[in-house]
Image (cartoon, rainbow, N blue to C red):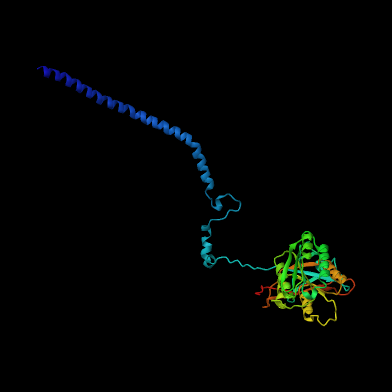
Amino acid sequence: MRRSSLRGPYETSLRAFWLNAIFHEKYMRNFREPQREKTAKNYFSVRMRSLLPFLTIAVAMSQAQVPKPPWATGSTNPAKPASSDSSKNNDNPSAAQAPETTLKVDVKLVNVFVTVTDEHGAPVAGLKKENFTLLEDGKPQTISMFDKESALPLSIVVDIDTSLSTRKDLPLELSSARRFAHAILRPIDALSLYGFNEIVSEVVPFTSDLKTIDHGIDRVRTGSATALYDALYLGAEALQSRKGRKVLVVITDGGDTVSRTDYKQAVRSAQEAEAIVYSIIVVPIEASAGRDIGGEHALIQISEDTGGKYFYATSVPQLDDAFRKISDELRTQYLLAYYPSQRFSDSSFRRIEVKVDGSSSGSPFTVRHRTGYYTTKSKF
């Protein structure tokens, strides 16, 4: 009896506690759900307000970066969309299918340096563009550029024969060459010195420094044989990449004994380099049986073909006079440049002719220039 009376109140209290717990859980759940939703809404609202400026900037930047069609840019001459021309394209399908073709024509500007002298051999200055007529293969050409004794840089190669046959006169030739360099060179110019005997040696590379040139002249030594055409060929090759006016001055007795290149290759090299060749032929005894007449004629021809000149010298005064005349000519040259018109000849060599009028005395001027140029490079 005692045990049963105690179980009743205990079970009643436990059941009451259990019911109270269930009620409390439901109550708290109902109370928390609105609070959570309210808190979440407040948090989302605050985050959106903080992100709103960044979203505004991002939208503006994206709109600015989106490309617009031409007719939507607000230009005064808007281009029409491609669809608006569909009817036109359908009317002419061949025009729509045919791509545009661009023709490219590579026309090289041809430079012609011209020396004009009067009946006394003195250079003629003061001529104008209208005084010149220029022809290529007999057809008149339009002179696109005209300049008097230009300020173009001057590149000079001096080839000095140091073979055994010139041993006696070599010191005098070197002295004349030294005076020529001091008289002609400006800061923008450059001179290179070559000595040739059985081999061709570059004694001084291109420079405008007179002390360097003088030091190189002092180091020239004699040899035995003569490689004249090799010296002409290599001197012209050295001028190939130079800018402005290009001059090759050769001092020799005219003989060639051991060259690997021939006369034709030497001439071709000078013409391709656009070099003006001046030949100073040293003849100690004019009636000497040992003179190489063939070599002298070759030097005369190459000088005429390139627009230069040849000189004979039998003494130091004549050597100095030859150098002085070369200096005077280089200071009074004319530059004519033109773009060749249509060509009909199959030859790779184009012949140039320059005519000059305006002589007040009635005597015709003497005009010297290169006789032509090659349209293709040699394969020597």
Q: As rendered, which of 7 and 229 lies closer to the eye? A: 229
Q: Residue at x 83, y 65 (%)?
A: 179
Residue most extreme to the left: 1
Q: Is residue 101 left or right of residue 293?
A: left
Q: Looking at the rendering, which quadrant does residue 289 occupy?
A: bottom right
Q: Looking at the rendering, which quadrant does residue 331 occupy?
A: bottom right
287 shown above or below 57: below
Q: As rendered, which of 277 and 372 lies closer to the eye? A: 277
- Pinpoint residue 168: horizontal percent, then vertical percent: 82, 73
- Pinpoint residue 226: horizontal percent, then vertical percent: 75, 75
29 shown above or below 238: above
Q: Is residue 215 visible?
A: yes
Q: As rendered, which of 335 and 136 lies closer to the eye? A: 335
Q: Quadrant of the N terminus?
A: top left
Q: Is residue 287 left or right of residue 374?
A: right
Residue most extreme to the right: 361
Q: Looking at the rendering, which quadrant does residue 358 occupy?
A: bottom right
32 shown above or below 370: above
Q: Quadrant of the C terminus?
A: bottom right
- Pinpoint residue 23: horizontal percent, then vertical percent: 26, 25
Q: Is residue 283 left or right of residue 246?
A: right
- Pinpoint residue 135: horizontal percent, then vertical percent: 75, 74
Q: Is residue 144 visible?
A: no
Q: How many marks?
A: 0
